[in-house]
Amino acid sequence: MGSETPPPPGGTNIEGRAPESEPTVETDEATITEDAELERTLGLSGGLAIGIGTMIGAGIFVFPGLAAGRAGPAAAASFAIGAVVALLVALPASELATAMPKSGGGYYFISRGLGALPGAVVGLSLWFGLVFATAFYLVGFGFYAVDTLAELGVAVGEGLVVPLALLFGAGFTVLNVTGTENAAKLQNGVVALLLSILAVFLLYGSLDALGVVGQPSAPETFAPFGSIPVLTTAALVFTSYLGFAQVATVAGEMKRPGRNLPLAMIGSVLVVGVMYVVTVFVATSAFGSDRLAALGETAMVEVGREFLGSAGALAIVFGGLLATMSSANASVLSTSRAIYAVSKDALLPQWASRINLKYGTPHVALGMAGGPILVLVTTGQVEILAEVASFLHLIMYGLICVALVALRRDEPEWYDPDFRVPGYPFVPALGALTSFALIGFMQPASQIIGIAIMLVSAGWYFYYARDVTLKGAL
């Protein structure tokens, strides 16, 4: 069957369903070939922008109110736990990415380390995991777009949340079709402006929390609901840390991948993890967890108003708009690359990996990403979308760590990473254990949906791709 991974290098071509010669399709604007490769146009700043820009949206602007309602002031600890788990996976993922700088990220690593069946399940699940995550980001964007209009004196109501999310979701898909550089330029600009806004907010908020400015707040019990809600909240907010893995999905487009991939993945986790913890600490100190929880997805708007009046509220709604925009844009990009990588290996029909040579983008894969995203956006269910995305990513993260151990054990000829994990084998072992353990603290509905997606992915493999044999990684 197709689960063996022969060690010799020789490209990512497959044996099985792949045709003897790759077809070429003529269009009015470009020639599309199935053996074309994506161009390496992303530098370190682009990688960091994808990682930070994806992660910073939900964690700071959507989750504080929801997390405070579940864990109280200890919500800051929930974000810290998520950061530790993410870092334990980012280190093994960085080693694998420098050994296999190919589009597809976790799918590519797992398929080459553990075989075609685990790779197919993870690859197809990653597609849907990113779809759920992107829909979550877009719904958050819709909430902040409505709030921005309200702050500007245009009251439209929450009925416009989903239509705005759909409109911009379609727009981000079209933007990514026109070129990775265009999407990266938007991402770089948005992240730079966003970090400037957050730096001012966190500086003032930290001074307020320490009692240097503002009014003192009544002290609260740190973990009023006990330790279990801290862990369940960590499972919910882990969606905030999916961005570092999305850097790996565009590894095939990174310049100097041996240097830039580890710096982008590990650096984005460290930067964003610190910002999350400080933000939630500042927010709960300013408002108290009960009041923060009552305000829900846009609680941070009122925190900004508390600090700096209407100017602070406007700055936060604009920051939230930028953050959720950057998360959605980067996720559309990463979703399409996951589909591209799986179809290049013929685990999906190979026409899904076609590249438009005018723009150098996998336009078919982008369409397969954007369509399901827009369908899920119509549900408007923030927490379920977030947890299902976390579930599917945590499965992938655990298996990434297992794949690293398998490849270190076998040491195939082509495996020559530029970066090696410090503390091996304890770091990948702990990364796998913590990733799988966090799944147990999710709500049952999210677990059921996640398991169902994995079972469907396995069924598709046995129906369509069980005769596929993967070649070496390079």
Image (cartoon, helix red, strand yellow):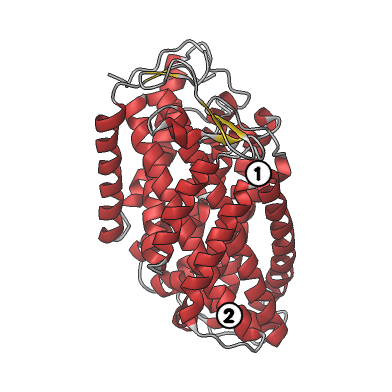
> Going 67% across and 46% down the picture, which residue do you hit?
48
Image quadrant occupied by the C terminus: top right
Is residue 131 visible in the rendered structure shown here?
Answer: yes
Q: Quarter of the image holding residue 127?
A: top left
Is residue 54 visible in the rendered structure shown here?
Answer: no
Q: Is residue 312 left or right of residue 384?
A: right
Residue 127 shows which numbered tag? Answer: none
> Going 31% across and 20% down the picture, which residue do you hit?
2
Q: Is residue 457 left or right of residue 332?
A: left
The residue indicated by pointer 1 is 180
The residue indicated by pointer 2 is 147
> Going 62% across and 39% down the picture, which residue do you hit?
28
Question: In the figure, 188 relative to 314: above or below?
Answer: above
Question: In the figure, 14 relative to 445: above or below?
Answer: above
Mark 2 or 1, which is nearer the eye? 1
The one nearer the camera, 292 or 155, is 155
Question: Mark 1 Cα within 10 Å, few/some/many (few <14, many 20+)?
Answer: many
Image quadrant occupied by the N terminus: top left
> Going 50% across and 42% down the picture, which residue do you hit?
364
- Amino acid under label 1? Thr
Cα distance in 3D space between marks 2 and 1: 30 Å
Helix, strand or loop status at disc 1: helix
